[in-house]
């Protein structure tokens, strides 16, 4: 498993549900947590490591004290959302690109945990933003598609640089 970068076409694929939460799923989730920390991220979706399944991990970048508090959400669904907020987002798959996005300020999510139990989570602020960002990934949506026209213009050159740097071999 390794982190995929824009414009890898696998980042645009819609992920499939995890059929059963088994040892393989737990092992992959553990590897994803390591990758997230190695890149100092606070969230990582399975599609970002080339695993086309509906699962994401969240964690804290705050040094060691956040270790062990990571959470894994399998087959996540937002069951309700409310409010609006603007916050700055970035993405491990789009290094160096940051922009302010408007999203719901509160979401209620249902998912399975790594034991296959249903969990329900009410999240706001940063966690709400991370959840919406990661579920977008599972639908093949990168945050740059949600930018305002002005921001899209602002990051155009950086996107072109990423396209040059990370374009998969043979794809033109
Ligand atoms: Zn992302």
Image (cartoon, grey):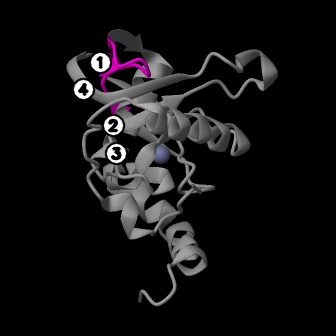
Contact? badges 1 and 4 (CB < 8 Å): yes
Q: Earlier in the sequence, mark 1 or mark 2?
A: 1
Residue hosting label 3: 53
Name the N-terminal-most of marks 2 and 4: 4
**Secondary structure type for disc 1:** strand
Question: Which residue is depicted at the point 44% across and 22% down?
Answer: 114
Label 4 sits on residue: 77
Mark 2 beta carbon near ligand 1 (under 8 Å) = no
Q: Quadrant of the N terminus?
A: bottom right
Q: Which residues are magenta?
A: 102-118
At 33% across and 13% down in the image, what residue appears? 117
- Cα separation, mark 3 vs mark 4, equals 13 Å
Please identify the quadrant where the C terminus is shown.
bottom left
Q: Residue furthest right?
A: 64
Q: Nearer the viewer, mark 1 or mark 3?
A: 3
* Residue 75 placement: quadrant: top left
**Residue 19 in the image: above or below residue 77:** below
Q: Is residue 114 within the magenta segment?
A: yes
Question: How far is the residue under mark 1 from the one under mark 4?
Answer: 5 Å
> In the rendered structure, are the residues bearing label 1 and label 2 in contact, judged by CB atoms less than 8 Å apart?
yes
Viewer-closest of 31 and 146: 31
Residue under label 2: 135
| Residue linked to disc 1 | 109
- Badge 4 marks a residue whose secondary structure is strand
């Amino acid at each position: 498993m390794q982190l995929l970068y824009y414009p890898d076409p696998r980042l645009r694929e819609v992920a499939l549900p995890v059929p059963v939460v088994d040892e393989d799923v737990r092992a992959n989730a553990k590897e994803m947590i390591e990758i997230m920390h190695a890149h100092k991220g606070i969230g990582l979706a399975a599609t970002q490591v080339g695993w086309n399944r509906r699962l994401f991990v969240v964690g804290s970048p705050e040094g060691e004290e956040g270790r062990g508090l990571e959470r894994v959400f399998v087959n996540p669904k937002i069951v309700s959302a409310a409010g609006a907020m603007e916050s700055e987002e970035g993405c491990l798959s789009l290094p160096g690109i940051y922009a302010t996005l408007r999203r719901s300020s509160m979401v209620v999510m249902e998912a399975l945990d790594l034991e296959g139990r249903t969990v329900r989570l009410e999240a706001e602020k940063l966690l709400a933003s991370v959840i919406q960002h990661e579920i977008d990934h599972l639908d093949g949506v990168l945050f740059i598609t949600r930018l305002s026209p002005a921001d899209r213009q602002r990051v155009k050159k950086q996107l072109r640089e990423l396209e040059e740097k990370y374009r998969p071999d043979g794809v033109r």
